């Protein structure tokens, strides 16, 4: 592929936004080219424009040729032949790319039928082979699953399987490993490297994870504000970056450690051998024929001013455990919150405690209502829980926005008008305005650029110190976990395989699985 003087602008409500400005690069056969830069730098728009996947509001100028054929302005029939066959995409957010109404088998088989003509048992065999390749456990049992029944990492693996189904010549991977845990991330990168080697496949790799770029790419193009500000061979660019922006990106690294837990800090939440099993019903009478054992015998405690990091692969039970502690799903075993066992309380008795336990989700775009302004989103809890009714809500919203690093004059805007990092700050503000005692952070930094990740971790540290917050921090990014956690719990397929002080877990892991996690994390990340 050869891109020359590519510019992309969007016209909306009479205003014009220049998203990409005179970008030029090329990709040779068998080569991996990386586009790096922060959110909003124009990486994804550049990639989408190469095969005309942008909306009608986009105006594209310049030249994009694939195998000598001009793609800009090409007939739709020609573009359709290239898309998914010669050029495949892996998108960052699999939930918006997979059809919620179709099973995995149907979605994978559709592409195989369209491009290869395989049906029946031959198509099923190909689907199973692809799911095996991308690390789906027991793929036969997953064929009838729908996207919502998979974890985030599992959904991304299915997306990668779909992209690889037809042996593309060029794979455009837009943040393909963002939602994956470190062991699967290492497997996927190894798989992509093997495919590239075996089939002479080329790749355009879009990411904010510079550790992956250094390990994986042949050449790097750094983008900022729609322009390429630096380019070069990977080793040369990492060893001697010339542009100040590239230097800033490379120096953005998780450092430091959390403040010590205050002496005599009270226990905010604890569990003892908590079990979360989901029944499997069969037959006309819906008899219970078995259980999905999501979490087995999990015991933990978290004090005021303390962070417990919960790590493990997708599907290990991390989020399920946190949701059970907040009584958002049912479980067996005591859950003690602020000295009171809340396991048997009904929803009415729980309601006064809800403001004291809050959650920040992985994907702020999915957890913030697109129909509400930022002011309405942040203030919603104040109204529901009648927090400080004598104070003006707008005044309280402005205060918390300043505290999390947002401009209060933007409170009239909607979520889509903010960057990923700003949306995550909105989600943190929505939780923090209620002054909770326990905050569950479910992968709050995984979709963010490295520079923004560092800012969010610093913000969380400051808030914890100021308000004595107890955090349950769920993440597959072990560098972030190390920077924020006092204690670490390691989970695998519902079991707690190891837990203890963060320093002990990181420096002297006791189980093979924890050692495998550490090796995968710091092999993939260490060079960043």
Image: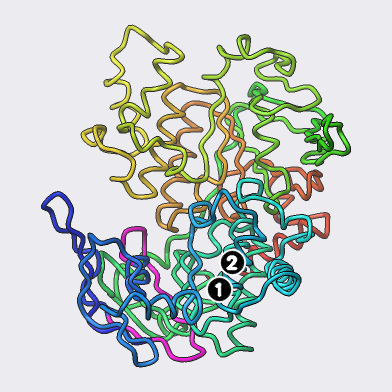
In the image, residue 440 sits, relative to residue 455, either above or below, namely above
Q: Are marks 1 and 2 in contact (CB under 8 Å)?
A: yes
Rendering quarter of residue 356: top right
Q: Which residue is mark 1?
A: 114
Residue at image location 59% in from the left, 30% down from the top: 470
Question: Measured from the top left, where is residue 93 in percent x and y?
Answer: 49, 55
Secondary element at image label 1: helix
Crowd class of label 2 (few under 14; some 14 to 19; many from 20; radius 10 Å) = some
Question: Measured from the top left, where is residue 74 in percent x and y?
Answer: 29, 80
Residue 37 colored in magenta in the image: yes
Distance of label 1 from label 2 (alpha carbons): 6 Å
Q: Which residue is mark 2?
A: 110
Rendering quarter of residue 368: top left
Question: Measured from the top left, where is residue 432 in percent x and y?
Answer: 45, 28
In the image, the segment drawn in magenta is 24-42
Secondary element at image label 2: helix
Residue at image location 69% in from the left, 72% down from the top: 123
Residue 2 colored in magenta in the image: no
């Amino acid at each position: 592929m050869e891109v020359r003087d590519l510019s992309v602008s969007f016209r909306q409500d009479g205003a014009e936004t220049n998203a990409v400005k005179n970008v030029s690069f090329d990709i040779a056969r068998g080569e991996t080219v990386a586009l790096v830069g922060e959110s909003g730098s124009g990486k994804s728009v550049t990639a989408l424009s190469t095969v005309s996947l942008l909306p009608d509001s986009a105006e594209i100028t310049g030249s994009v040729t694939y195998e000598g054929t001009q793609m800009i302005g090409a007939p739709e029939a020609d573009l359709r032949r290239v898309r998914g066959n010669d050029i495949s995409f892996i998108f960052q957010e699999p939930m918006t790319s997979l059809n919620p109404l179709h099973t995995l088998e149907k979605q994978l088989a559709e592409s195989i039928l369209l491009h290869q003509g395989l049906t029946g048992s031959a198509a099923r065999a190909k689907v199973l082979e692809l799911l095996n390749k991308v690390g789906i456990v027991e793929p036969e049992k997953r064929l009838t699953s729908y996207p919502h029944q998979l974890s985030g990492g599992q959904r991304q693996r299915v997306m990668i399987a779909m992209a690889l189904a037809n042996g593309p010549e060029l794979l455009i991977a837009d943040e393909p490993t963002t939602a994956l845990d470190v062991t699967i991330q290492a497997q996927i990168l190894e798989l992509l490297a093997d495919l590239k080697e075996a089939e002479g496949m080329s790749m355009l790799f879009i990411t904010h994870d510079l550790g992956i770029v250094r390990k994986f790419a042949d050449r790097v193009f750094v983008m900022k504000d729609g322009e390429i500000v630096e380019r070069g061979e990977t080793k040369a660019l990492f060893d001697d970056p010339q542009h100040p922006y590239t230097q800033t990106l490379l120096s953005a690294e998780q450092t430091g450690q959390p403040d010590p837990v205050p002496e005599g800090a009270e226990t905010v939440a604890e569990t003892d051998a908590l079990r979360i099993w989901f029944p499997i019903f069969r037959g006309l009478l819906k008899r219970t024929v078995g259980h999905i054992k999501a979490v087995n015998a999990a015991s933990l405690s978290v004090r005021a001013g303390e962070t417990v990091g919960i790590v493990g692969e997708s599907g290990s039970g991390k989020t399920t455990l946190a949701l059970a502690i907040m009584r958002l799903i049912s479980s067996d075993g005591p859950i003690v919150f602020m000295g009171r066992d809340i396991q048997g309380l009904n929803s009415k008795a729980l309601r006064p405690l809800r403001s004291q336990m809050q959650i920040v989700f992985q994907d702020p775009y999915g957890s913030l209502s697109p129909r509400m302004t930022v002011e309405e989103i942040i203030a919603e809890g104040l109204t529901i829980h009648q927090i400080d009714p004598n104070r003006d809500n707008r005044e309280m919203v402005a205060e918390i926005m300043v505290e999390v690093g947002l401009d209060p004059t933007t409170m009239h805007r909607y979520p889509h008008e903010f960057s990923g990092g700003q949306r995550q700050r909105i989600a943190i503000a929505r939780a923090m305005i209620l002054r909770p005692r326990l905050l569950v952070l479910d992968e709050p930094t995984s979709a963010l650029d490295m520079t923004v990740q560092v800012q969010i971790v610093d913000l969380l540290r400051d808030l914890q110190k100021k308000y004595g917050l107890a955090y349950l921090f769920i993440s597959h990014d072990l560098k972030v976990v190390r920077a924020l956690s006092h204690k670490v719990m390691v989970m695998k397929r519902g079991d707690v395989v190891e837990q203890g002080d963060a320093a002990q877990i990181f420096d002297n892991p006791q189980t093979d699985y924890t050692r495998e996690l550490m090796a995968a994390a710091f092999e993939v990340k260490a060079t960043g």
